[in-house]
Image (cartoon, rainbow, N blue to C red):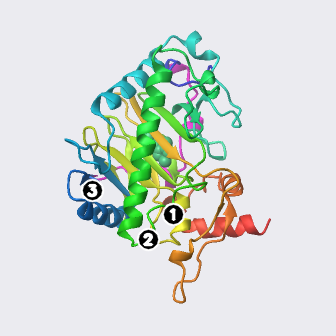
């Protein structure tokens, strides 16, 4: 618990192990602030699904702006739910240390826990992030006992988080359906075990950092799940790889940042790419972000779907169990910079040769 960054006075944190090797440092010049494509979900379904596919192909990332009036498409998380979620997450990190101590754990096998740093193996390098990770089995059952392991303070945390998860997952599934329609496929190919695992949320807290030029909040990584919905918060901090450089994401109020996970890259046989991203730090403001991960079940076998394989298009990825994929793809390839995406195929070779 002593190593939780948001609780320790910075003067007591040993900073040496946070300083990154030169080739990983954020560049001296800040990257341009680029707005990710913002997809206005009020448009017609045809237009929206084309926009989702185009943005997905070019960036692997986009921001879904909220639905207004009663449009059925897309981001249907009411503003109040977003506000409640942001507030409750902020409140959690402001609780006195003893209220949080029982959730702290360094055991990566624990489904619900509070911890500090990255979840990948990082070869000893530390990252300037605290995180409350919560798992929610799907479908959400009202009497579910697992939520009993979630913090009971702030008082409304369980209720607010559960409500948010249900709505955020619905947005994710709707976007997957839109993608299928845009690609001319059956709309339900992502329904089932491929999206039926726990919904995981990472509530990330990046406290003000004494040396933002030499410390990152999260290393460059691609998400290992199917699709991710991120509430980036109002403070800058998310960088996305684009054309060999990093671009900063300019948060759009009430929009949800969406990015494709590696399983979507595998299923689509590389048509949709999972793009590398990282979290930077700043010395002034604490930042809170909430990542919602739609996950396959651990035993789900995932490989290129037949719809994406043809005579001119051999399968570029192997078919492996999600559980094995996650176990193997657990190391941040230090120094690899912007090429994690292309490593995905090599990682898969490692898995299948075991
Ligand atoms: C993540 C992630 C980015 C952010 O949790 O996987 O990429 O801006 N977070 O916090
Ligand atoms: Ni991520």
Give the distance between the C-alpha atoms of the residues marked 1 and 3, in whole angstroms: 25 Å
When the figure is inspected, residue 106 is found, relative to residue 41, above or below; the finding is: above
In the rendered image, residue 14 lying in the magenta stretch gets the answer: yes
In the rendered image, residue 25 lying in the magenta stretch gets the answer: yes
Q: Which mark is residue 27?
A: none
Badge 1 marks a residue whose secondary structure is: loop
Please name the residue that numbered disc 1 is placed on.
Answer: 189
Q: Main secondary structure of the magenta part?
A: loop
Percent coordinates x, y for residue 69 in the rendering: 19, 41
Q: Residue at point 57% right, 16% down? A: 100
Give the distance between the C-alpha atoms of the residues marked 2 and 1, in whole angstroms: 8 Å
* Circle count: 3
Q: Are marks 2 and 1 in contact (CB under 8 Å)?
A: yes
Percent coordinates x, y for residue 13 in the rendering: 56, 24
Badge 3 marks a residue whose secondary structure is: loop
Q: Residue at point 61% right, 72% down? A: 317
């Amino acid at each position: 618990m002593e190593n939780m960054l948001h609780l320790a006075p910075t003067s007591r944190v040993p900073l040496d192990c946070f300083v990154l090797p030169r080739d990983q440092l954020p560049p001296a010049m800040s990257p341009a602030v680029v707005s990710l494509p913002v997809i206005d979900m009020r448009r017609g379904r045809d237009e929206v699904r084309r926009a989702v596919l185009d943005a997905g192909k070019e960036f692997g990332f986009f921001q879904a702006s909220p639905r207004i009036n009663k449009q059925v498409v897309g981001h249907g998380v009411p503003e109040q739910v977003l506000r409640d979620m942001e507030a409750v997450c902020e409140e959690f990190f402001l609780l006195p240390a003893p209220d949080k101590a029982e959730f702290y754990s360094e055991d990566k096998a624990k489904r619900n826990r509070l911890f500090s740093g990255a979840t990948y193996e990082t070869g000893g390098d530390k990252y300037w992030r605290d995180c409350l990770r919560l798992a929610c089995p799907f479908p959400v059952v009202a009497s579910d006992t697992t939520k009993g392991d979630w913090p009971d303070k702030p008082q409304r945390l369980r209720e607010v988080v559960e409500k948010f998860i249900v709505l955020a997952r619905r947005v994710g599934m709707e976007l997957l359906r839109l993608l299928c329609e845009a690609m001319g496929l059956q709309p339900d190919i992502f329904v089932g075990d491929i999206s039926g695992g726990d919904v995981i949320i990472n509530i990330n807290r990046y406290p003000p950092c004494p040396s933002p030029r030499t410390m990152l909040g999260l290393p460059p990584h691609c998400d290992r799940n199917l699709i991710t919905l991120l509430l980036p918060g109002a403070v800058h901090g998310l960088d996305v790889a684009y054309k060999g450089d990093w671009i900063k994401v300019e948060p759009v109020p009430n929009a949800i940042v969406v990015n494709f996970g590696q399983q979507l890259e595998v299923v689509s046989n590389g048509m949709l790419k999972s793009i590398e991203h990282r979290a930077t730090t700043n010395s002034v403001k604490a930042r809170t972000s909430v990542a919602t991960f739609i996950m396959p079940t651990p035993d789900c076998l995932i490989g290129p779907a037949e719809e994406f394989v043809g005579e001119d298009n051999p399968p570029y990825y192997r078919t492996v169990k999600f559980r094995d994929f996650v176990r193997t793809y657990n190391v941040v390839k230090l120094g690899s910079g912007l090429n994690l995406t292309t490593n995905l195929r090599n990682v898969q070779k490692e898995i299948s040769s075991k």
